[in-house]
Amino acid sequence: QVQLVESGGGLVQAGDSLRLSCAASVRTFSNYAMAWFRQAPGKKRDIVAAVNWSGDSTYYADFVRGRFTMSRDNAKNTVYLQMNSLKPEDTAVYYCAAARFGSYSSPHAYSSWGQGTQVTVSS
């Protein structure tokens, strides 16, 4: 099982940037696809971005494409989500997730989750 710990959330103003980090405790991090999800109050959890095991393929949801960038550092067992031009509608709890099998861009592939980090964007 993979243990995931997110960090980097906070309160920012619209237009600001934040970088989220997710550190994984697992022996073979490079065997896992990784993703960021988010969940706002009263809404379902949505996939935001995902990266394959090597980091050379990424997926972005339409609502963040062009503003968010996901990357991974397999030497540090860490993934990142750089969030630019933040909007109030980006306010949510952001979760890091890992998938050992399946398509990296499929939300259903992810079975290991972090505890989440709150991102709040004020207008």
Image (cartoon, helix red, strand yellow):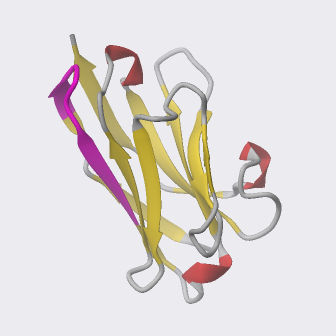
Magenta run includes residue 78: no
Magenta run includes residue 15: yes
Q: Is residue 93 above or below residue 52?
A: above
Identified at 80% across, 58% down, the residue is: 103
x and y, in percent, of residue 88 in the image: 32, 16
x and y, in percent, of residue 27 in the image: 55, 89
x and y, in percent, of residue 83 in the image: 34, 40
36 left or right of 10? Answer: right
Q: Quadrant of the N terminus?
A: bottom right
Identified at 36% across, 23% down, the residue is: 91
**Looking at this view, is 29 or 56 the one in front?**
56
The image quadrant that residue 16 belongs to is top left
Q: Is residue 115 visible?
A: no
Q: Is residue 36 visible?
A: yes
SS majority, magenta: strand
Q: Quadrant of the C terminus?
A: top left
Identified at 22% across, 24% down, the residue is: 15
53 left or right of 88? Answer: right
Image label count: 0
Residues in magenta?
11-22
Q: Is residue 24 above or below residue 63?
A: below
47 left or right of 91? Answer: right
Q: Is residue 93 above or below residue 98?
A: above
The residue lying furthest to the right in this view is 102
